[in-house]
Amino acid sequence: MPSKRMSRLAALFGEFFVVGLFTIGGGYAMLPVIRQQLVNKRCWLAEDEFYNGVTVAQTCPGPLAVNIAVYSGNHVAGPAGGLIAAFAVVLPAFLVMLVVAIALSGGSSDRLLKAALMGTRPAVAALLTYAAVMLARRALPHARAQLVALTALVALSFLRLHPIWVIAGVLVYGHLREHVRRRDRDHAGTAVS
Amino acid sequence: MLAQLFLSFFRIGLFCFGGGYAMIPLIEREIIIARGWLTAGEFLDIAAVAEITPGPVAVNVATFVGYRLAGIPGAATATAAVILPAVTLMVLLCWIIPRIRPGVATRELVILRPAMVAMIGAAALFVGRAALVDMPSILIYGGVLSGLFSRRLPLVPALALAGVLGMVFFSGG
C-alpha cells in the first residue's frame, strides 16, 4: 500500500516541522513538544518507547532534536521515515537562520541592533556557566568523576588540546578503570572462595 | 570552500556529544581558530540569535557560518554536514540496539559524562573571556546568572532583557 506509506511520511514531515519550529533554546526544550505531538496526539510511540528514544538520542553524537526525530521517524516508517523526520525538524531552523544571516550581513551597520547583540553576549556567557554548573551537579556523583572533568577542562581550556583528543582520552580512561575494577573484583572473589 | 565547510561541520557533528553547548569548544577550534572563518565576538552574536530562534544551536551556527562564507549553497552544505553523522549513526543505532545487550550504550554515556561537563565548562570559559570586557558586561553577566540560579528569570526573557540593557549601555559609544 504505497499511498498509505506516503501519507504516513507526509504526516511525519508535518509533525516534525512543527516540532522544529517550536524548539526555541535547544534540544531539551523540545522534549515536551515531541511528547505531545507523537505520544498524545498521534499515538505513534508509547510513553516508554519515547523515553527509550530519548536515552538512545543522548548516547549518539549530534543535536538531540535531530537524534530524536530520526528515532521516532525510524520507529514509525523505517529508515526513510528517520530521514524525512530529520529533514523536517531542521528545515525551520535552516530557513529562519538563513533570513537572519541575510539580514545581519546586509545591514550590520545598525547601531541599536549591534548594541543589543553586545548586551546578549554576557547573557550567553551566564547561560553557559549555569548549564555547566547544573550539569556538573547532576552528572558528577563522586570525587573521581569530578577530578576527571576538571582534568579534561584544564586540557581543553588551558593546554588547548583539541576536543576530539579529550573525548577520546576520557573514553579510554573510563574503560581502563572499568577493566581494572572488574579484575580486582574477580581477584577478590577467587581469594574468598 | 564547500568541501572544507563540509569537512569542518561533519567533524563538529560527529564529536558533539551531549547537546548543543558541548559543541562550542569544537566550533571554537574548527571554525574560529583553525580557519578564521568567524571572530569570537561574531560567534557570540550567532549563539545569542541561535538561542532565540527555533532549532538546535548546532544547526543554527552551521547555517549562519555556511551562508557567511559561501551564500545559500554554503548554508545548505554546512547544515547537511553537521547533521549527517547524527542521522547516519541514529539509523544504525536504531537497527543495532534491539540486537545487543541492553545497557551497553548507556554505559558509554556514563563514562563520557565528565567530558561533557568539561566541554560545557570550556565553552563557558571561552565565551566568558570574549564577552566580559567592561563593567556593564560584567553587570549583565552577574544579573543574568543570579536570575537563572534563583529560577526567577527564564531564558528567553533574560536574553531580551540583556538586549535592552545592551542598547542602553553600548549604543552611546
Image (cartoon, grey):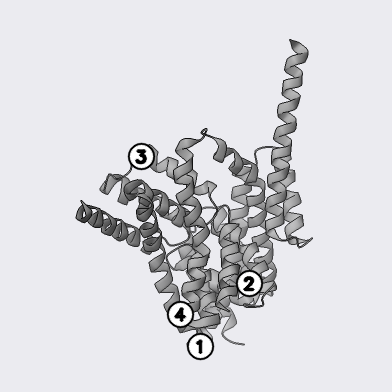
Sequence-wise, which precedes: disc 2 or disc 4? 2
Q: Which residue is drawn at 49% across and 82% down?
A: B71
Q: Residue flagged by tag 4: what amino acid is it?
A: Ile
Q: What x and y, as percent, mark residue B3?
A: 57, 74
**Secondary structure under the numbered disc 3 in the rendered image:** helix
Kindly identify which residue carries mark 4.
B72
Q: Is residue B75 above or below residue A53?
A: below
Q: Residue flagged by tag 1: what amino acid is it?
A: Asp
Q: What x and y, as percent, mark residue A159?
A: 79, 60
Q: What x and y, as percent, mark residue B75?
A: 48, 75
Quarter where residue A52 is shown: top left
The dot on residue A47 is 3
The dot on residue B31 is 2
Give the CA separation, mark 3 to mark 4: 39 Å
Instruction: From the viewer's perspective, tell me whether residue B117 is left or right of residue B54.
Output: right
Q: In this view, does B80 lie above or below A180?
A: below
Of the pair A71 and A114, the residue shown nearer to us: A71
